[in-house]
Image (cartoon, rainbow, N blue to C red):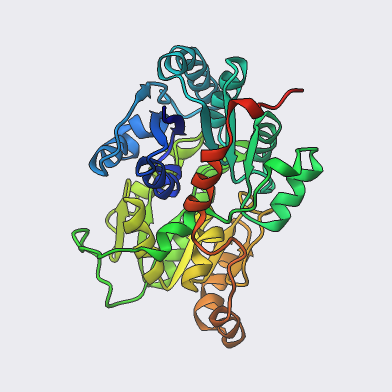
Amino acid sequence: MNKNICVITGTRAEYGVLKPLLSEIGKNRNLNLQLVVMGMHLMREFGYSIDEIKKDGFKISAVVNNAYKEDSKSAMVVSLGKEMGALPSIFKKLNPEIVVTIGDRGEMLVAAMVAKVLGISVAHIHGGDVSGNVDDLFRHALTKISDFHFPATKKSKERILGFGEHPKYVWRVGALGLDSILKPGAFENKYGIDFSSRYILVVQHPVVSESGQAKQQAVQTLEAVKETGMKAIVVYPNADAGGRKIIEVIKEYEGVQGFKIFKNLPHDIFLFIMSNAAVMVGNSSSGIIEAASYKVPVVNIGSRQKGRERGSNVINVGHDKKAIKRAINRALFDKGFRKKLANVKNPYGDGRTARKIVKILQRVGKNELKIR
């Protein structure tokens, strides 16, 4: 009998990273892919990315309707509560042997908690990373709950081992988001983007602990980008507390000449747009993890990624218009920085992560449940 592998996804960005793994599991004769979709995927104002999952041909095994009703921390907690109430019956029906989680989001922590109470093994991708904000609490809690660990870097692996996890169940596999970079595919330009001229890619998410400042932070970023006079592609943020405040600001720039705004972009399209950007600006983990493989310079703003390992393509600044604009100019024109950029190495691996994870998932299971 095939081993049931249940993968959880709650956001468009995380789905894009997981997609190569979903494909590898789906085509493996010894594994049965189960996909549970929830959260931001079901929110039309953020692009309703469940449609993207269906279009990609993945069978959705279950849907948890826990979309946020408002832009607040309490709404996030209510959403997690709905998830916790829904998952026991879903897991009972699907009977997975392993539940696969990724990163540091609350949806993942709840899924892992429910799985462990029900005696189901948990695998965690991207454990051991440090972003330097409150999300680390969820990530490290996931590490302690999980049975099998797939960190991206040497430092992340060492951090997991430092938490007391058994070396036998910690595998450094690289960053899953890099798998798509090796297979970008043909790009059909149906998004009206002019690739013949340089543009700035902007992706800025809220930081939950700074949600009250999200609107002003977005203003500083977008004003700096506007003042460069360059074209810009702006992508909506995630749905965490403060996300709707950022969207309010983005909407004010819809009429700015040269600005193109997208609620959602398929991951492969997003990577293509990133690979051709003159510079990426904001606080997305894509700027930290994937951009180095394309040798794209990144202006990383604020605290959201402050603890992560990064390549020499990244310039760190605060939420200040003048500082952001200076950093953009440095990324584009500073000869010393451009020389470093040409030789940048990505610390997150070689882009063959999904295959490594699937090989391990085939050979581990319930008989290796962690006992505390």
Residue 226 position in % (x across, y down) = 41, 65
Residue 295, compared with residue 78, is above or below; it is below
Outermost residue toward the front?
1
Residue 239 position in % (x across, y down) = 44, 36
Quadrant placement of the N terminus: top left
**Residue in the foreground of this view, choosing between 120 and 49:** 120
What is the tally of numbered marks visible in this picture?
Answer: 0
Q: Left of 39 or right of it: where is 306? A: right
**Residue in the foreground of this view, choosing between 124 and 295:** 124
Quadrant in the picture for residue 67? top left
**Residue in the foreground of this view, choosing between 141 and 118:** 118
Q: Is residue 220 visible?
A: no
Q: Is residue 132 visible?
A: yes
Residue 129, compared with residue 208, is above or below; it is below
Quadrant in the picture for residue 247? top left
Residue at left offset 49%, top offset 65%: 291
Quadrant placement of the C terminus: top right
**Residue in the foreground of this view, choosing between 112 and 106:** 112
Residue at left offset 57%, top offset 84%: 334
Residue at left offset 55%, top offset 35%: 105
Quadrant in the picture for residue 166? top right
Residue 60 position in % (x across, y down) = 32, 30
Residue at left offset 57%, top offset 87%: 335
Residue 169 position in % (x across, y down) = 68, 41
